Amino acid sequence: MKKLVLLLVFFVTATTVAQRDEAYVNAKVSEFTTSLQERGINTFFTTYRYCLGKIEIIDLGNGERCASRGTFYEVYIFWKEENGDQMMKRIDNCGMFYSVEVSTPDVVGYYMDNMEQLHENKVRGYETAEASDGPTQRTEIHNCYRRFEFTSNRGTSKQQYNLFDLTNEADNKNIHYEYNNGLKVVALDGTIDMIINENLARLRRQQ
């Protein structure tokens, strides 16, 4: 009987951890972006940052921990309030963070100014001029991806790319290297890096 109880406790715990996966993150993102649209905010964008297989165990305080299942996702949503304040929201496998105002740089304005290119121009996969003897070699870090969802009155467009596609590190050079690194979405991603680094200490997890 005691063993049965222990197994039941383990199963419940495992189920709780299993919910902290991509489906959980997507549901939280959908919940929040829907709330934006209900307030009449229809221009915003979302970026997913993740490395396949990267697992995180987060200390939530009060003796509680949260573990990702398989892959840990960091998601950032950017939008502007009616008064012009630019806001950022973080969501991950362990829930939501309080929204924070980020004054500069104006990434939402950048999105609005370059909307057509951000919706239409996609990162091209790593391609070599000549076929190699085997598959192009990738290092472990190139299991990392970016996924963007751009929403405006024209609808929502998505694109995803592997960070490997932005490099020239393989034996055979990437013929799309210059094209990819000249795209507006890649420039936007670099600016987001800076904003996250500058504001990481300000982020507080919602209880």
Image (tube, rainbow, N blue to C red):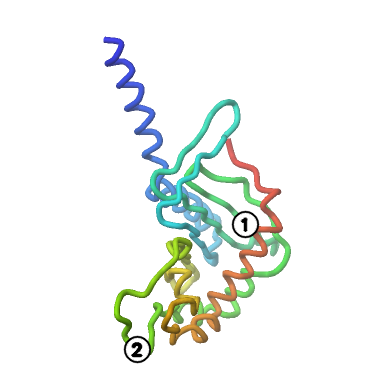
**Residue 115 x, y percent position in the rendering:** 53, 78
Measured in 3D between alpha carbons, the distance from the residue under mark 2 to the one under mark 1, in whole angstroms, is 43 Å
**Which residue is found at the position 44% from the left and 80% from the top?**
120
Q: Quadrant of the C terminus?
A: top right
In the shown orientation, is residue 134 left or right of residue 189?
Answer: left
Mark 2 nearby-residue class (10 Å; few <14, some 14–19, many ≥20): few
**Which residue is found at the position 41% from the left and 83% from the top?**
172
Please, what is the three-letter code of the amino acid marked with disc 2?
Answer: Glu
From this viewpoint, which residue is outermost toward the right?
103
From this viewpoint, which residue is outermost toward the bottom?
129
User: Which numbered dot is residue 130?
Assistant: 2
**Helix or strand or loop: what does disc 2 sit on?**
loop
Please, what is the three-letter code of the amino acid marked with disc 1?
Answer: Met
From this viewpoint, which residue is outermost toward the top?
1
Seen in the picture, residue 144 relative to 166 is either above or below; the reply is above
Seen in the picture, residue 5 relative to 127 is either above or below; the reply is above
**Which residue is found at the position 70% from the left and 59% from the top?**
102
**56 and 135: which is toward the camera:** 135
**Residue 118 x, y percent position in the rendering:** 50, 77
